[in-house]
Image (spheres, rainbow, N blue to C red):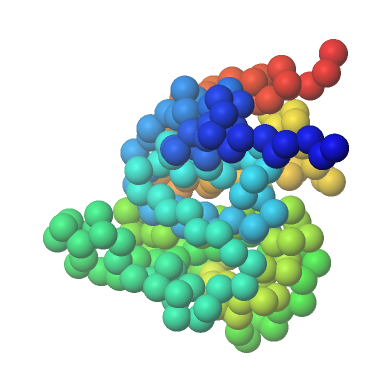
Amino acid sequence: MREPCPDPFSPRRRMCASCLRPQSACICHWITPVAAAAEVLILQHPLEVANPKGSARLLHLSLPRSRLAGGETFAEADLRALLHAPWRDRQADAHANQAACYPVLLYPESAGEVVSDCNRAALDAARLRDPARLRLVVLDATWRKSRKMLHLNPLLQALPRLALTEVPASRYLIRKAHLPHQLSTLEAACLALSRLEGDAQKFESLLHAFDGFIGQQLGYRPR
C-alpha cells in the first residue's frame, strides 16, 4: 500500500511568506534594514531560489532600495526595464527623477567568459561618485551559472563592470568557494556598497546578522 502524500498545509510544511522558507527555518529575525544610497538589482538564477544556503533573499529583505528578479534568460524588454526604468518608490522622489539611474554590473573583469570589449560600456568613474544615481546589478548564481547568464543576456554583457579588489576573507562557511577571494552575494554587495559610499562601517550590522544566519544554517548539519 502506498503511503499517503504529506499534507502541504501541515505545520511542518508551512512557509514564511517573507523569506519563503519553512517557518521552522525562517530567517526573518536576521533581516537588518540598511538604507543604502544606491539601488540594488539582484538577478537570481533559478537554481538559487530554493537553496537554503543562499544569501540573496536576506540581502534583498534588508535593503529597502532593492529588487529581486529570478531567471536565467530574461526577455529583452523585461531586462531593459529592470536595468533602466524608474522603480515605483523612486517615482515619488523628485530628486531621484532628475537623472536616469546608471546601471553597473558587479562582476570581475575576467571570469572565463568571452565578451567583446566593443560591446561593453566603459565604467564612468565620475558617475560612481554619486551612488544615489547608481543601480548596482548583482548576479546571484554560481560562477559557472553566472557566466551562462551573461552569455544568454547581451544587455548584461553590455553593462559597465565594477570589479572588487583587495577582497577580505569570506565569512561564508556554509558553501565552498573555488577561489579564496570569492564572496557570497550578500558579502560582495555590502563590500561594493560600502566602498561606493566611502563608509566601511555602514553595512557591518547586516554582515553581523549574516554571521547569525550562517550559524543557524550550520546548526542544521548533523553532528
106 relative position to 181: left or right = left
The quadrant holding residue 43 is bottom right
Q: Position of residue 22 (x, y in %)?
A: 58, 31
Foreground pick, 125 / 216: 216
Q: Quadrant of the C terminus?
A: top right
Q: What's the residue at 59%, 38% (across, down)?
A: 8
Taking the image as shown, residue 81 lies to the left or right of residue 138, namely: left
Of residue 39 and residue 43, the one placed in the foreground of this image is 43
Q: Is residue 105 visible?
A: yes
Q: Which residue is at a point 57% across and 29% down the rendered structure image?
A: 10
Give the residue furthest to the front: 1
Residue 22 horizontal side relative to residue 180, left or right = left
Q: Position of residue 82 (x, y in %)?
A: 43, 67
Q: Position of residue 32 (x, y in %)?
A: 43, 28
Quarter of the view holding residue 182: top right
Q: Is residue 200 above or below residue 205?
A: below
Residue 187 placement: quadrant: top right
For the N terminus, the image quarter is: top right
In this view, 194 is above or below 106: above
